Amino acid sequence: MKIIGRERERKIIEDCYSSKRPEFLAIYGRRRVGKTFLIRQTLKNKITFAVSGVYKGTRITQLTAFAKELSHTTGKQVPVPKNWWDAFDLLRTYLEKLPKGRKVVFLDEMPWMDTQKSGFIQALEWFWNGWGSTVEDLMVIVCGSATSWMRDKLIRSKGGLHNRLTRRIYLKPFSLCETEKYIKNRGVNFNRYEIVECYMIFGGIPYYLDMLQPEFSLLQNVDSIMVGPEAPLSDEYDMLYGALFEHSEKYTEVVETLYQKKEGMTRMELLQALDKKEGGRYTKILHDLETSGIITSYNSFGKQKQGLVYRLTDFFTLFYLRFLKGKKITDMQYWEHLADSPVRRNWCGHAFELVALMHTQQIKKKLSILGVLAEESVWRSSTANKNMQVDLVIDRRDEVINLCEMKYSLKEFSIDKDYENKLRERQELFREETKTRKALHITFVTTYGLVKNKYSSIVQSEVTLDDLFEE
């Protein structure tokens, strides 16, 4: 299967391979986002030695897996090393005996190898600093889904691996454009409206998208993939968080609290909701969740760091919590039967907001402001009008602020008199509270645009579904 997209990431890997110096490349990103596939498809048979960490494996389990892979690679029986120092020494001995030419070592799911008190990091430091960094034809690739571990122990290491990486890649989920190309390459012929709904359920996660069956409708696919004890993703929620974090129940507690408030929470609001007085641990949990792509922090307009608003933005998690968690579903056409329900329509509206927030570059492209310095933020009224908020504020250097409104609709969206009054009231409240002197432009992000009527003139610019599919 060929790679869709990922041109920038493939070029980095290929440049590293063809360089004339030692290379130490780290690739990290959310579980199931396609890190291993990217590496193996880009390098194919150029990998000299590869080993993957074992999920929840002990130190002995990890070392046994290492020895077995090295045995298969060398064609000789390799005894299980006593520790990671011996393991990397065995690897070095093997590599030193090979003829000149690029040698690629691939350590996949490396965070799982670093079991408690295993000495893995120190041994890796010794392997690279004492030998690997002097070998011009050596390329080491390390990969992990536990993004917080990759950042803390490797990318931002303050120990022996400080500044040792030569390149790094944070692999993001597919955009809408890449998702469309990916599923069409698999023979799945959804229209763009269906692709957006698909994105609102699975996100741009290739592993999930790969499960789509061309002969099924989107509704049938969702039931087949998600619903019932035999569905392939029925236990994915627990697997996802268990693979990413130790003590995953602390992380899901935060995730499920953020889920309760779709507009997001500040750190203080979260601690109050959790009934916690001491927030040191939760600062780390929020950091870990954000670096793993589960939540996103947004600046509050006109406020500094204490005004950060955290939102749950992982589409799979949102869908699971809304429709599947805690439910014993016996209807194997569950999603099909919810197709026109109020609860589903409400979810669509919220999920579409997040799709738009994930595609702010496309929004700015449509507004022809990619070349204009601009800051993105959210805004909530600080007065009694607590329900007044803007989910995306684009504050531009050219003295314009775009107040973006997202609306998911089966047809062109129609603004009536009451809604126009609400937009005008919010616009004036924003001006009054922020004291801004910039021009305020209302921008609508919709599926099919606006009905042109006597109330639609309050909107200065429109972004439609097709615009969000731009590269």
Image (cartoon, rainbow, N blue to C red):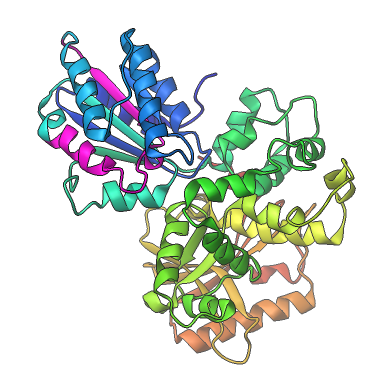
Q: Quadrant of the N terminus?
A: top right
Does residue 321 belong to the magenta stretch?
Answer: no
Decide which of 237, 455 is in the foreground and name it. 237
Q: Left or right: where does residue 369 sit relative to residue 103?
A: right
Q: Which residues are magenta?
A: 100-129
Instruction: Reply yes or no: does residue 128 show up in magenta.
Output: yes
Q: Determine the residue positioned at 43% across, 58% down.
A: 288
Q: Is residue 186 above or below residue 231?
A: above
* 79 up-or-down from 463: above or below: above
Please indicate, yes or no, whether residue 299 appears anywhere in the rendered image. Answer: yes
**Taking the image as drawn, is residue 467 in sight?**
no
From the viewer's perspective, tell me whether residue 63 is left or right of residue 160. Answer: right
Q: Residue at x 59, y 30 (%)?
A: 181
The answer to whether 170 appears left or right of 344 in the picture is left
Counting from the top left corner in percent of width and height, residue 153 is at 29, 50
* Picture quadrant of residue 369: bottom left
Residue at 19%, 22% (x, y): give it. 92
Counting from the top left corner in percent of width and height, residue 59 is at 37, 38
